[in-house]
Image (tube, helix red, strand yellow):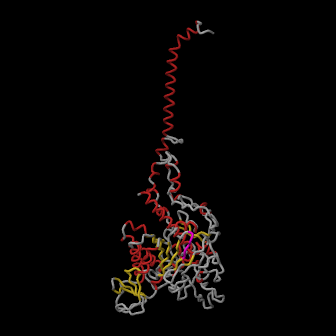
Amino acid sequence: MAFGSPRNSIFAAGFPRKVSTIAIAIGGLASFFVFGLLLRLSYPNGSSVGGVFYGIGTPEQVEVPLILSNHTVKGLQKSSDIINAFDSNPTPDSSSGSPGDVSKNLPPPDFDGGRQVEKQPLTQEKEDKVSLDTTEKINVPSDEGEANDTKAEETPSSSSSPPHDDDSSETASPEPECDLYQGSWFYDPGGPLYTNNSCPVLTQMQNCQGNGRPDKGYENWRWKPSQCDLPRFDARKFLELMRHKTLAFIGDSVARNQMESMLCLLWQVETPVNRGSRKMQRWYFKKSSVMIARIWSSWLVHQFNEKFDYAPEGVTKLKLDLPDERIMEAIPKFDVVVLSSGHWFAKQSVYILKDEIVGGQLWWPDKSKPMKVNNVDAFGISVETILKSMATHPNYSGLTIVRTFSPDHYEGGAWNTGGSCTGKEEPIVSGKLVKNGFTEIMHEKQATGYNQAVDKVADNLKPKLKLMDITEAFGYRHDGHPGPYRNPDPNKITKRGPDGRPPPQDCLHWCMPGPVDTWNEMVLELIRRDLEGRKRKSSST
């Protein structure tokens, strides 16, 4: 049909009105779509106004409380063997000495007598990948709730990230997020990372398997904090974190016990060079320039034997307000120090404060006069003294870790009055822990001394001091001591005699491998946290 036809003329004549009508309709429809699009953009991902009001929001806006995290521990867990090491208010079945009676359950003397003897949170899947054979580059995991610093540098920021992610300093507070010292013991069939035969530095007294101990289950129990995982010790990670640094264990024979545990763990990836002397044991790991050192200091404060006032020569005197000068001389060379003390306060000694004799242990010439300071008070004072001195030392800026009082497990008496831990093969079951009065009050005085030292140093020095509170958790490990297996003598007595008396034994130090290795897992975690904290602080300034 030609456009010039009458029909086309009618169509052409009515076209302007239809165009205007259609234009109005299209405009309204377009407005409707624009409005809908704006509404959609305002509430993406299917969220509704009601959802926003009720706090549902987008996935980035939802924060799951750490306490709700479900960390599962792989490996065998016998329901009867899980040790819930911390009840809300644990009630002891019995007491082997009240806190006020410090003469009971005194720990044994140190057997060597002072002689030198040559994150994201770590998931169990990540932990399972840790191996002594790994050769891949070590990436230090960030702490719980903190974005990995390396990934943050490599990944460009996204516009969909929540605004508060830009300020990581407010959300990344590592240590408060997980208390390492509350948790439970679980059975790990994987066993320890070394054996008594793969570590040549073991003191024979702690070589329980070499001394004939028949059971080995005590080697398989591992510590699980309640709200996170404590990773299995990673020797390569430790050496990388401590590259060009020195870790020193300072204190008594329990410090030696822990130092040897550390050496055994590290020995599995590199054989160190002995650079020790009579004054200080030192082991050097060449590849990473890491030094492990140990200084013997029974009390951590100044001691001497010369006559002082009415205290005769030959009795050990302790100046409780002066640190051991050997420690203060050595610490500028150290980057991390682990302190161990307490058990020697059961030995004979005289206590001096401000050049005045104020008390003593197993020594007091005038019974008619009360002592101002007993041995547990003296312990607390000594802790405060050494910590304040180290924190304020002008040439020491390292991390100081106070490992709390290591519990002994002499039952039925003290070390020299028939006490025994013979036959203990598993951790104590929850609710069956027998409280030790001496251990409890020594722990209390140590914690008090630590807190007083922290309170008295400047705010910028407080982060240099850490309390590694192992006492209660290790109260459950009566199975971890050498007991009668203190030496390799094949004819040694290991069972009670006909009269019921137990054989001579050590229920203070720890078998190796054994529970003591957990202390060094905690030390590694504290070092990691400290380094991460320093990195965050430097990046925020």
Q: Quadrant of the N terminus?
A: top right
In this picture, residue 125 sits left or right of residue 391? right
Q: Is residue 413 visible?
A: no
Residue 91: x, y in percent? 50, 73
Q: Which residues are magenta?
A: 283-287
Q: Is residue 85 visible?
A: yes
In this picture, residue 386 sits left or right of residue 273? left
Dominant secondary structure of the residues highlighted in magenta in the image: strand
Image height check: is 278 above or below 63?
below
Q: Quadrant of the C terminus?
A: bottom left
Q: Residue at x 53, y 10 (%)?
A: 13
Which of the 4 quarters of the picture holds residue 285?
bottom right
Residue 117: x, y in percent? 55, 83
Image height check: is 224 above or below 112?
above
Image height check: is 491 above or below 138?
below
Please name whichever residue, 95 or 265, is drawn nearer the observer in this view of the structure. Answer: 265
Please name whichever residue, 481 or 538, is drawn nearer the observer in this view of the structure. Answer: 538
Residue 525: x, y in percent? 52, 66
